[in-house]
Amino acid sequence: MSRTQAESVIRNIIREIAQSCLNRGQTLSETLIAFMVKAVVLDPRNHFNVDKTLTKQDVQKLIELCVDRLMDQTSPTLNTIKMQVYFDMNYTSRCEFVEEQQRVLQSRLLSLNREITDSRAKTRDDLNSLYGKIVSYIIQRSNLGSATDINTVRETTAALQSVFPQSELATFMSLMKQDKEQQLSELTLIVSGLRLFNKDNRKGGESIQNLPAFLNEALPAAVTDIESELAGSQRLAWQYTALLEKLSDQDTDHSDCPVDPDLLKQALYNTRQHESFLKLILADIILCAKEVVHLQSDLAARMKLLRDTVHSKTAVPIAQVFPHFTALAELWAGLEVEMALQSMLTDLVSSLRVFLSAQSLLSPDQLKLLLEGLQVQTDMERTSGTAESINVSEMSTCEWIFPEVTANFADLPLQYKGVCGYTLVKKNGLLVPGNPNIGVLKHKEKYYAFSYKSAAYDFASKADEYIAAVVEIAKRSPELIQLLQLHHEFAYVTPYSEMQSGQKLLVKPICKSDSCTQTEIHPLETNIVKSFEWNEWELRRKAIKLANLRNKVTRSMQTDLSHMRRHNSTQTFLPKDASSQTKRDRESNLPKPRVYLAGLRGEKTKASHMIKVDLTRAVDE
């Protein structure tokens, strides 16, 4: 069966399952049905083989099994899967939420933006209409009031006229479309900041909601409600865990338990999944509260700075105040995003309560009676207890990580979300948090935590077998795939948010990987003589060329345009080693004259007799 045919078969199966559920009064999403089809096929108890093409009997059996599971409204497993699907399809991170808000706003204003930028108004009425559209665009984009409120329109028009009078429409219309859009964005920020400043000075702005006061009241209330609901889910999960630990003992009599242990285990999965989602939402709410505090602080500081700038001044240069107005508008837009995010998260918490079926499984009196004499341990007590640490010398073949010698130990990405894999296998799917403080096993670049020492030793001795056993348990309980983050173990299953209804579901995926090969250029020596010539005249031509080369010289030149743009070379024959001499080196030196006069002094007579003696040496001496 080709890929296209397989996808067509899956679409038909999903369509028939949806129609069957609709006939029974249940409207289900295709994403939920698609995952249920995968879950039924993966379950080894149903004996489906993904390597073979499904027959008509197999398809009919698959449809019946899926419909039966989807119509079992009392099943905690179905409610858990519905909860997972709903959360993944409706929850978005902060960055994605901001991008989605911007995209929705731009799509809502697309037609009005096109009317403004494509306008070719010439008459006075057309110009007035264009100016009114700009005012409406600013109101809708800033979200400061309603465009149908007359007071809001008057305030916005007055603010716009102070920064963009109607006489400048001609200049605006002469701009390019991209420049028009940029100017509209700038005008929106400036006018919004001006209206916020006027509201702070009690000069209008009655239609603008007091976001800081609303958020200061809504966020603490949301945190309190979520923490209270989270505490209830955690308490129920701890009680179910203690009860299942008691029922998992072979010597324990199960007759006194009014609920089947497998159903109780499914209820535990349901509670743990609800707890996991609430923790994620609570972290986002707390981050939202911190961001609101930061934005409010910046907003107050910017408002004070702007008030000091324009205080007791009749006219202020636009270069001084416009940046402040723009900053005010951007800070207020940030508060609007936080308000929308808080509203989305609060609604998501309320919607998840519908899928929490574990609370109705046992009444409080029944649960209290079953827990009589049992010690209910919290997750904190299990993970921070003083259990015996792992001795590395006893399992030296494995790599162990301890908190005392590991930086950022608390940030290790533990497999199974910190659940003890040994207990998960040995007690047939019981979720017991591991205690990382006794030591963490590092196996194939993955980290595993365990609830006690002997469990770590047994798991480490046969790690691959236990990992495969966890996968088999997840096939029988498909909600564990999302709960324990086992998507990497299942090539067939993708997160719900990435799943499409027409996706190929019943055949193994094509695994692709990047690969490369390298070969030698010439692995064998060639016997080809490339300089061989069979033509005698070609040999004569080469000989003449070589002979003439003896009398030639290669020259090159450069111009101003070619300088430093290409390599230049010059070829010449080297000169011979020769020397010549045309003169002799000589020197001459004249003797220094020396004359001695005798008899000038020392004579006893009055008459003196002087004798002159020439002591100069001869030149030719």
Image (cartoon, rainbow, N blue to C red):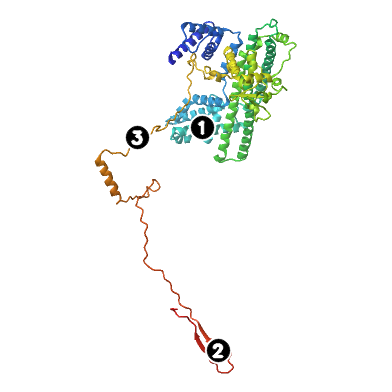
Percent across and percent down for residue 195 are 58, 31
Amino acid type, mark 2: Leu
Which numbered dot is residue 185?
Answer: 1
Residue 419 in which image quadrant = top right
Q: Earlier in the sequence, mark 2 or mark 1?
A: 1
The crowding category of the residue bearing disc 1, from other C-alpha atoms within 10 Å (few below 14, some 14 to 19, many at least 20), is some
Q: Which of the image's four quarters has the N terminus? A: top left
- Distance from Cα at disc 2 to Cα at disc 3: 109 Å
Query: In this orientation, which residue lies closer to the viewer: 271 or 219?
Result: 271
Task: Tell me how far mark 3 sits from mark 1, CA to CA.
Answer: 75 Å
Residue 439 lies left or right of residue 34; in this view the side is right
Q: Which mark is on residue 600?
A: 2
Please give the name of the residue rendered at 71% of the width and 9% of the height, measured from the top-left corner. Answer: 370
Residues at marks 2 and 3 touching, judged by CB atoms closer than 8 Å: no
Residue 255 image position (x, y, % from top left): 69, 4
Residue at (56%, 16%) from the top-left corner? 85
- Vertically, is 344 above or below 310? above
The residue mark sitting in front, 3 or 1, is 3
Disc 2 secondary structure class: loop
Which percent across, then down, holds residue 328?
Answer: 59, 33
Could you tell me the amino acid type at mark 1? Ser
The amino acid sitting under disc 3 is Asn
- Which residue lies most toward the right here? 373
**Which label sits on residue 527?**
3
Q: Is residue 195 visible?
A: no
Specify few, some or many for label 2: CA neighbours under 10 Å numbering under 14, 14-19, or 20 or more. Answer: few
Disc ID at residue 454: none
